[in-house]
Image (tube, rainbow, N blue to C red):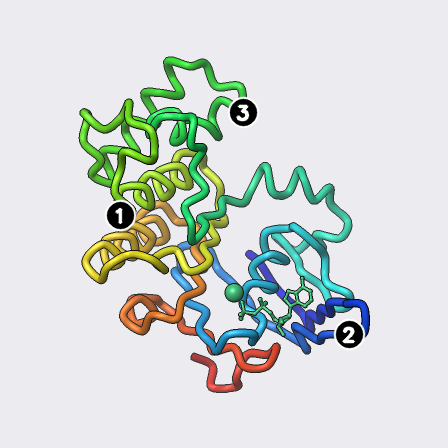
Amino acid sequence: MLTLQDVRYTYQTKNQVVEALRGVSVNFETGQFYAIVGPSGSGKTTLLSLLAGLDVPKTGEICWMGKSIKSMDLDRFRYDHVAVIYQNYNLFSHLTALENTAYPLYLQGVPKKEAEARAIERLKQVEITEEKYRRLPIHLSGGEQQRVAVARAFVTEKELVLADEPTGSLDSENSLRIVELLSNLAHKENRCVIVVTHDNKIAERADQILHMEDGRFEKTGG
Ligand SMILES: Nc1ncnc2c1ncn2[C@@H]1O[C@H](COP(=O)(O)OP(=O)(O)O)[C@@H](O)[C@H]1O
Ligand SMILES: [Mg+2]
């Protein structure tokens, strides 16, 4: 579904060129849960931002359903196909748990009532209880905020779900809950879920572990 062919990416800073990705080739399938692991600076975040369509490779190709994303409107690609979960949750601080979850549906023009009904379904799935629907993020625990962020990623039918260290600041119990949710999203809803993590317990739950080292995947095949 999502194929990378010899993808290279460099950052140009004032006095040097940083080769962040040095030839990444990989194939991601729907219904699968992938973990990307590797040392800091190995290129994981750069890779995710290319997968999210935030930028295009300097050379090489990223193809979505066989079509190069270079030939697509990247905003459209993101809007139609990609959901991202961030380490620091990125919930809107002035919106309630329910409004945060429903937000992608508001953007799609789904009527408020229907959007909220669909959001509530997702909040139930991530075990956020009713009395918390109307709370602002600051009145939720870190684990609850991250589950709301996951609910928001579930609420639209986007095929590609990307997460960069989604459990970074959570304790192990909450981390495992998030991983369980992401794993279900891949297996029960047939999405392609790609998670960057340094947590081995999370990586172990993935269908495939990809090891990044110095801008490339190690040739172990995971
Ligand atoms: N905006 C940037 N400008 C210059 N260099 C960057 C930038 N972002 C990342 N890099 C460099 O690119 C390499 C890969 O970074 P990154 O993708 O963030 O790795 P990881 O997420 O695995 O820690 C590192 O050497 C990093 O210093
Ligand atoms: Mg990173």
Kind of residue indicated by mark 3: Gln
Q: Which mark is residue 143?
A: 1
Image quarter of the N terminus: bottom right
Query: Which quadrant of the frame does ligand 1 lie within?
Result: bottom right
Instruction: Determine the secondary structure under disc 2.
Output: strand
Say whether residue 22 is left or right of residue 171: right
Q: Which residue is disc 2 drawn over?
A: 17
Sort mark 3 into few (<14), some (14-19) or many (20+) by Cα contacts within 10 Å. few
Residue 98 x/y as whole percent: 33, 26
Disc 3 from disc 2: Cα separation = 39 Å
Residue 15 x/y as whole percent: 81, 73
Q: Quadrant of residue 18?
A: bottom right
- Along the line of sight, which residue is nearer the eye, 22 or 206? 22
- Along the line of sight, which residue is nearer the eye, 216 or 86? 86
Q: Could you tell which of marks 3 and 1 lies nearer the N-terminus?
A: 3
Q: Could you tell which of marks 3 and 2 lies nearer the N-terminus?
A: 2
Kind of residue indicated by mark 1: Gly
Residue lying farthest to the right in this orientation: 15
Query: Does residue 115 sit above or below 36 in this rendering?
Result: above
Say whether residue 142 is left or right of residue 80: left
Instruction: Determine the secondary structure under disc 1.
Output: helix
Mark 3 vs 2: CB contact within 8 A: no
Say whether residue 93 is left or right of residue 21: left
Give me the residue at 75% from left, 53% from top: 70
Sort mark 1 into few (<14), some (14-19) or many (20+) by Cα contacts within 10 Å. some
Q: Which residue is disc 3 drawn over?
A: 108
